[in-house]
Image: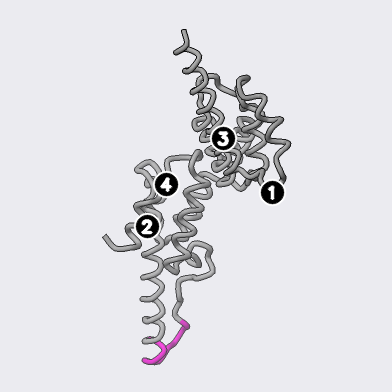
Amino acid sequence: MTEIEHEFAKIEKLTGEENWGLWKFQVRVINLTNGAAEILSGDLVKPEPAGQMDAQGTAEYQKRLKEWKKVDGLAQKSIVTTINARNMLHIINCTSAREMWLKLHEVYENKSETSKHMLQQKWFSLVKDATDDIATRVSKIKDLACRLAALGEPVSDSMIMTKILMTLPSSLKHFRTAWESTGEEQRTLTNLISRLSMEEIRQGTDQNDVKNKY
């Protein structure tokens, strides 16, 4: 497996509107690294013969066409190896990477707007789940933030921290006051997660000590 094929293998296959934004971002970045991004954007178009050409002109045209086909082939490969069988049906009649890219946009762009609105509603209605520990709760919030960012709606660390604090269980409500008294430069997402995890462990240890007394 070549290095670029290894990179393709890391991309989660496009399955539908739920991961369209993330897939589109990953494929675009991969093609930036392999020099094929301009194929997808339409800035690098297939060379056309310039009417009557002499031998030198024909040779130059053939050279440009060969180079374009090579780059277009890389871009096509980045798409067909990272989508599922159902999506393959959408592009099976396409003859270039640009056609494939536009076809998938046609299929998913409007759907992704609906998906974005649904994720936004989920973000604002997210509430605490008594069965979640801190790591699980933080993971759910960060996952939702990543999915929104992939659809063009970035969520700041400040918003993530606020959401974490607003969904703390009653046993950790006191933590919010302690956190707000922390110096502003120390109020980072990393520090918040670390301190909450330590507080959760401390509470678990205290509860075990109480049980052992009886």
- Classify 163 as above or below 149: above
Q: Nearer the viewer, residue 186 or 159?
A: 186
Residue 53 picture quarter = bottom left
Estimate the spatial distance between the alpha carbons at disc 2 and disc 3, rounded to whole Å. 27 Å
Magenta residues, start to end: 50-58
Under mark 3, the amino acid is Ile
Q: Disc 2 to disc 4, how far (Cα)? A: 23 Å
Which numbered dot is residue 7? 2
Camera-side mark, 1 or 4:
1
Callout 4 amino acid = His
Residue where numbered disc 1 is placed: 185
Q: Is residue 143 magenta?
A: no
N-terminal of the two: label 2 or label 4? 2
Residue 141: assigned label: 3
Quick one: label 2 or label 1, which is nearer the N terminus?
A: 2
Q: Quadrant of the N terminus?
A: bottom left
Residue that label 4 marks: 90
Residue 91 to residue 135: above or below: below
Instruction: Tell me how far mark 2 sits from mark 1, CA to CA.
Output: 37 Å
Q: Is residue 177 found left or right of 130 in the rendered image?
A: right
